[in-house]
Image: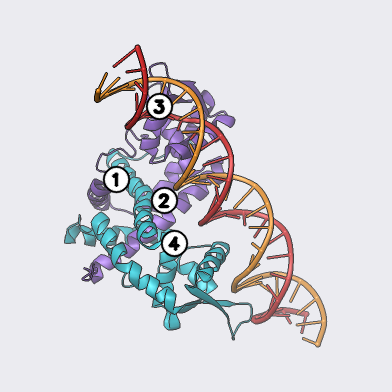
Chain colours: A purple, B cyan, C orange, D red
DNA sequence: CGCCAATAGTTGTAGCGTCAAGTATTTGAT
DNA sequence: ATCAAATACTTGACGCTACAACTATTGGCG
């Protein structure tokens, strides 16, 4: 603890920029989705994960893993989405402890309606300012970071192709 | 709106990884700082910005810009930090509408104590898994994204050298 | 000068996430 | 077969952030 390995100037520059993006990007996505669709980014992400799942159905625990949420958080969010008619809860036949979250037709429509604006925002803020080389580099670098943050590759598994 | 430009497979892969990092990284930083120092990442960042400022003092509005916070949020946070003796409020002589936030000696000690563990976490999760080339690429890519998200380069201005 | 808009900040409220506690069910060990 | 531990969620309370409303200055403009 006494001899800290500080960051070099180059590492510090890169780190500061990354942390700025990490702070600013969620807000940018949030603002657009909230304004145009009345959805938080997490709600959209949840619906998107369900939309890609077989039968548009996932067990709460699996959905929680894919969205990197605690079960408690997901339970609250699903309750709200349920009240809005976008998701439905179903008892799981195989394991009666479990609950399945199912995307309703209305929920599907909401994802389909939200996707184009969301993708446009993603393009504007991240993809379009980058060259093809940048995108490849970004993929490689984020992959390395994720080896540490999410070694099991659980987050965003089967992510929506339209995200 | 009708003809959406979807993402290519390569763009989608990179995007999914970036969004995973954006979701997971704050939690990783938060957990370590909360556990070892009883500080949220935002509180740490706020103290770090003050620690780098002339006289360890910044006007609320300036500090809000550097930390990418609304004034309302910052006001609440500073109130809490004030109660803990880490920050002090001072009236601004030049402009009596304004309030200066000043880092106390105790606040300085808290930043100094928190920094090594925080840097270690940054290294473990981001820097050490990357090569020198990766770091340079990361810097370039995040720089391009920030041109969109923060064109005025306001966020993290004068960021702590020990962050 | 006097007034009005803009700026700087605070405070209250409501919504979302975390944590702790509680229920129901299943698994596994004896 | 039985009972304890683990699993799968749900719920309630508390803390933090965004939003809106409010006060106090300051800066312009006529």
**Residue B122, located in which quarter of the rendered image?**
bottom left
Which residue lies at the image location 40% right of the left edge and 21% below the top edge? A55
Left or right, A144 with reference to A111: left
- Residue B42: give its label: 4
Chain identifier of the residue bearing label 3 in the image: A
Which residue lies at the image location 47% right of the left edge and 32% below the top edge? A112
Secondary structure at numbered mark 4: helix
Residue topped by disc 1: B14
Residue topped by disc 2: A124
Q: As displayed, is residue B41 above or below residue B103?
A: above
Left or right, B66 with reference to C8: left
For the question of whether residue B157 can be seen, the reply is no
Q: Nearer the viewer, mark 4 or mark 1?
A: 4
Q: As rendered, which of B30 and A18 lies closer to the eye?
A: B30
Residue topped by disc 3: A58
Residue B163 % position (x, y): 33, 67
């Amino acid at each position: 603890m006494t001899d800290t390995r500080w960051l070099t100037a180059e590492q510090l520059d890169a780190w500061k920029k990354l942390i700025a993006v990490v702070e600013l990007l969620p807000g940018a996505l949030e603002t657009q989705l909230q304004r145009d669709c009345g959805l938080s980014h997490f709600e959209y992400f949840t619906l998107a994960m369900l939309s890609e799942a077989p039968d548009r159905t996932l067990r709460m625990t699996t959905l929680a893993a894919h969205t990197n949420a605690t079960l408690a958080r997901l339970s609250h969010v699903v309750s709200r989405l349920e009240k809005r008619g976008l998701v439905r809860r179903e008892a799981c036949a195989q394991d009666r402890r479990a609950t399945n979250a199912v995307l309703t037709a209305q929920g599907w429509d909401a994802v389909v309606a939200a996707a184009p604006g969301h993708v446009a925002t993603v393009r504007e803020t991240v993809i379009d300012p980058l060259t093809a080389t940048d995108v490849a580099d970004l993929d490689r670098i984020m992959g390395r970071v994720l080896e540490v943050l999410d070694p099991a590759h659980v987050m965003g598994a089967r992510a929506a192709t339209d995200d």
